[in-house]
Image (cartoon, coloured by chain):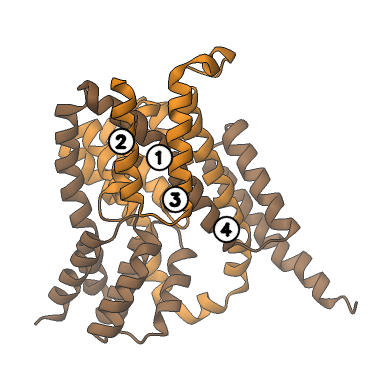
Chain colours: A brown, B orange
Amino acid sequence: MNIILELFLTFLKIGAFTYGGGYAMIPLIQREVCDNKKWLKDEDIFDIVAIAESTPGPVAINAATFVGYKVSGFPGALFSTLGVIIPSFVIISIISNILKEFQNLRAVQYAFMGIRAGVLALIIRALYTMYKATDKNPFSYFIMGVSLIMTAFAEIDAIYVIIGCALFGLIYTFFIVKETKDDPA
Amino acid sequence: MILLELFLTFLKTGAFTFGGGYAMLPIIQREVLNHGWLSKSELIDFIAVSESTPGPFAINMATFVGIRTFGLTGSLLTTFGVILPSFVIILIVAKCYDGFKKSRAVKGIMAGLKPAMIGMIGTAIILVGSTVFFPDGFALSSFSRVEFYTALTIFAISLILAFKKIHPIAIIILSAVLGIISGYL
């Protein structure tokens, strides 16, 4: 089978069978791309994760584009990305229309009242997972606090906060971390 | 021009979120609420739907907002917008991959961005939390409403289950059922 078509179908499958996207998708990519198709080596998965999380945009799209490009250049990237988004796009379009029909029903409104409380719990769970994976040092805590206050209370556009934190991370890594490393103590 | 605005909004979202998922909520929230495209509770309902359908969270959200605001054309543009920065940046990174991997600048930027994402998710939690517990704004009288305690109970149950690693979909279904039951009690 044509490799472009295979890439497309593989990512179509990945898009259709992962929930929550992003990191949930990585094990599936590993199984399909490394184990089954042998397009990439197992250790490449670490590079895929590293690239996907340190470039802007959804992890799932980054990973699909990167794998597609590695396997088959620009056309590979294009069709892998298309594959991974099509299931989402189709399913959400259908659900959106169904919801529109039923959202005024009292039972549906009650259901969503419950769901909102459940979603709050899920986001807190996700925060906890991310927090565990982050460096714990005064600099990190400072950034966490500042970005929270700026976006939640000062209502500063998150984009400026992101740019600011990126610059601050650069300054920190190049000037402050270097100094402590040179410090003989 | 609403179509152009939809496209640009999601282009911005795609270009300035790292790690995807919930970290993009403060940006989406600000844009979507400022434009008056959705209400706060609609936005949270969308989060729930995006969480319980397959595919990347970011794509689900983009498609959803697009389709509700301007039908199929809207959803095509929002989805295209949110993936375009990823796609272009990954193609560039894939070409100068080893340099990117070893770059101290990338490490520095990530040192700033990872904790910033945690702060942003904190902001998302405050948004969702305020809608769940104080839908009409914070007031002392909120604490005497039955709905407050219903929400608190569903939230507490969901949180315990989330930390016991119960699947998010199971939690969403359960909180929907609890919401319906308490609504009719």
Q: Chain under label 4?
A: B
Q: Amino acid at mark 3?
A: Ala
Q: Look at the picture and state if B62 lies above or below A29.
A: above
Looking at the rendered structure, the secondary structure element under dot 1 is: helix
Q: CA distance from mark 1 to mark 4?
A: 25 Å
Quadrant for residue A150, please give it.
top right
Point 76% across, 68% down: residue: A177
| Earlier-in-chain disc, 2 versus 3 | 3
Q: Please, what secondary structure does the residue beneath circle 2 have?
A: helix
Same chain for the residues under marks 2 and 4 in the image: yes
Q: Which secondary structure, mark 4?
A: helix
In percent of the image, x 40 and y 63: which residue is there? A23
Q: In the rendered image, which quarter is residue A44 located in?
A: bottom left
Q: Circle 1: is it few (<14), some (14-19), or many (20+) Cα within 10 Å? A: many
Which residue corresponds to mark 1? A118
What separation in Å lies between label 2 and label 4 (alpha carbons)? 33 Å
